Structures are given as C-alpha cells and as structure tokens.
Amino acid sequence: FFSPPMGGSQHLNFTLGGLLAAGGAMGYAKGKSVPSLVAGLTLGSAFVAAALWSETEPFKGHALATGASALTVAAMGKRFKSTKKHGA
C-alpha cells in the first residue's frame, strides 16, 4: 500500500525539476519568453528523469542530474554576469 521512502537524491531531483519547470512557465507567463519555457521544461524534465532513473540505475541517474546541474549553473551564471546587478 505504501511505497518505500525515496532517497535524498531523488527528492532533490524531483524538487529541482518542479522548480525549474515552474520557473520556465512563469517566465513565459510574465514575459512571453519561449526560451525560458523551453529551458525550464527541458531541464525540469531532465531532473525528474534523473530522479526516476536513479532508483533503478543510480550511476546513470546521478550522471544525468550532474549534467543538468552543469547546464543550469552555466545558464544562470551567464545571466547573473550579464545583469550588472551583482556586487555594489
């Protein structure tokens, strides 16, 4: 009846997947930004897939999550650097 509790990495990946998908949807809703929608849904889906995959094939699931994380950091780092809002 009850499923076993999910591991920590699964929980984190499901959370990140949901947040990225929601962020992409919000970017589209507020500014009609199709790139935000596509990136949010793509990376969000990758994190959800990593969470699901890590249950049966942990190495592949963690590798997918690591790749999605690297893409997220690169994209957000580029945006952060271009805003000129950091560091007074």
Image: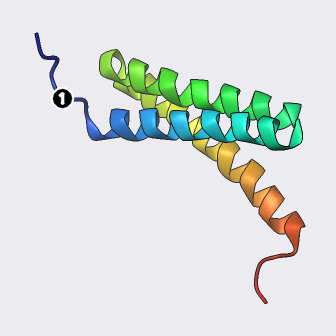
Q: Quadrant of the C terminus?
A: bottom right
Q: Please state if 75 lies on the left or on the right of 72 as rendered.
A: right
Q: Is residue 2 above or below residue 27?
A: above
Q: x, y percentage for residue 81?
A: 83, 67
Q: Please state if 4 lies on the left or on the right of 10 as rendered.
A: left
User: Residue, x 18% and y 29% (percent of image)?
Assistant: 5
Q: Quadrant of residue 15?
A: top left
Badge 1 amino acid: Pro
Label 1: which secondary element: loop
For this orientation, the residue located farthest to the left is: 1
Q: Please state if 53 lies on the left or on the right of 80 as rendered.
A: left
* Residue matched to label 1: 5
Q: Is residue 48 above or below residue 72?
A: above
Q: x, y percentage for residue 1?
A: 10, 9
Q: Residues within 10 Å of mark 1 (few under 14, many from 20)?
A: few
Q: Nearer the viewer, residue 54 or 88?
A: 88
Q: x, y percentage for residue 36?
A: 80, 38
User: Residue, x 40% and y 41% (percent of image)?
Assistant: 12
Q: Is residue 34 above or below residue 52?
A: below
For this orientation, the residue located farthest to the front is: 30
